[in-house]
Amino acid sequence: MGGIEVFGVIGFAVAAYAVVANDSIQTLGTFLASNSKRPWWVLWIFASTILVAVVAYGYISGAGDVAYDRLDKLSVLPGEGDRSGTFVPGIQWWHALPPLVLLVMTRYGIPVSTTFLVLTLFALSGGSATEGVLQSMLIKSALGYVVAFVVGVIIWIVISRTFERWVFDTKEELPWPYWVMFQWMSTTFLWSQWLMQDLANIFIYLPRDVSVISGETHVSFDLTYVIGGTILLVVIQAYIFATKGGEIQKIVQSKVNTVDVRAATIVDVFYGIILFVFKEISNVPMSTTWVFLGLLAGRELAIAYVAHLRNKREAVRDVLSDAGRAFLGLIISILLAFAMPFIGTGRLPSF
């Protein structure tokens, strides 16, 4: 198949749907919720245009790397010194299983981290070449949750008594037109930052050219793979938008004011800023899900305890429930990463 393994194709296709269905809703969820009265295809065209632009920008500016450096540490060529070659991931049937598990968990509305569920297996099965990658992913993601939680608490302590209460009291009124413009702008920023982080979770299944110069690794993808993958993502998005986001969307809708364009704009802005900062810190993959849940957790607690717009105990239960399901997803990811290679080869991956 032109260098693409059968299970690589399956893994890519399933991961494309699973990642978009699970993670993108955490990014576009407030956008969908606050624009639910608009035709779904209008929202789809908007989001898909940004998707195509981000992929095209990554391919052009990154010399073919649409994963924005996130796969550098998971695309290691043998040997030392300057070298180049084609990296074909040794995709086996068990590599395609995590996205299938993600589909099931998405069906039940579990906000699992696709970064951990998909990339953990590759990080552990790479031997000494990928040693330490999983630990780095865990540390960066945990730090992302903490930072997002603190930002959520601080920001919404400041604005919940005024801004959130104003939104809550005027939720039946039509917002001024400029709020719609602000939200579409903030969604453009957030959606692009999420794509730069999570496209790696999909394209990891495809062969890629790797060059190492002075210790710096560069990854690039064949244009045919990029075009085909982008078309598939756009088609999948059409289904997700037509079904109003599916089960994961309920997590967004359960939060205070998230269906209001004004509140949704503020959430998107700070979520996007946090993703941007962590993207610039290092090219280690991280869980955008943990960042999302951390921000919402800090926000909901601040709203409950400061603005009193929801029951305090209910807010705490909500936060603990989201965190617990995310932790469950991490445990499942690690268990799969150890169990699948053992079932297929009789050997445990190195950690």
Image (cartoon, rainbow, N blue to C red):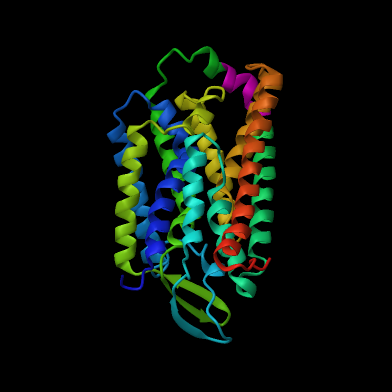
Q: Examine the structure image and report whether residue 157 is included in the region drawn in magenta.
A: yes
User: Quick one: 74 or 97, which is closer to the camera?
Assistant: 97
Asked whether 187 or 1 is in front, the reply is: 1
Instruction: Say which quadrant the N terminus sits in.
Output: bottom left
Task: Please say whether residue 199 is visible from this viewpoint.
Answer: yes
Does the rendering let one see residue 190?
Answer: no
Q: Where does the image place residue 257, in percent across and percent down from the top left?
A: 53, 22
138 vs 168, left or right, is: right
What residue do we see at 40% from left, 21% from top?
Answer: 176
Q: Is the stretch drawn in magenta largely helix, strand or loop?
A: helix
In this rendering, the answer to whether 217 lies above or below 17 is below
The reply to whether the magenta stretch includes residue 17 is no
Vertical side of 215 occupied by 164: above or below: above
Where is 25 relative to 69, above or below? above
Start and end of the magenta stretch? Answer: 156-165
- In the figure, is residue 245 to the left or right of 235? right
Residue visible at 49% across and 41% down in the picture: 104
Q: Report whether 195 appears left or right of 350.
A: left
The x and y percentages for residue 185 are 41, 39
Along the viewing direction, whichever of 35 and 350 lies nearer the viewer: 350
Estimate the x, y position of residue 157 in percent, counting from the top left. 68, 27
Q: Quadrant of residue 38?
A: top left
Query: Residue placed at 61% from the left, 20% from the top?
Result: 162
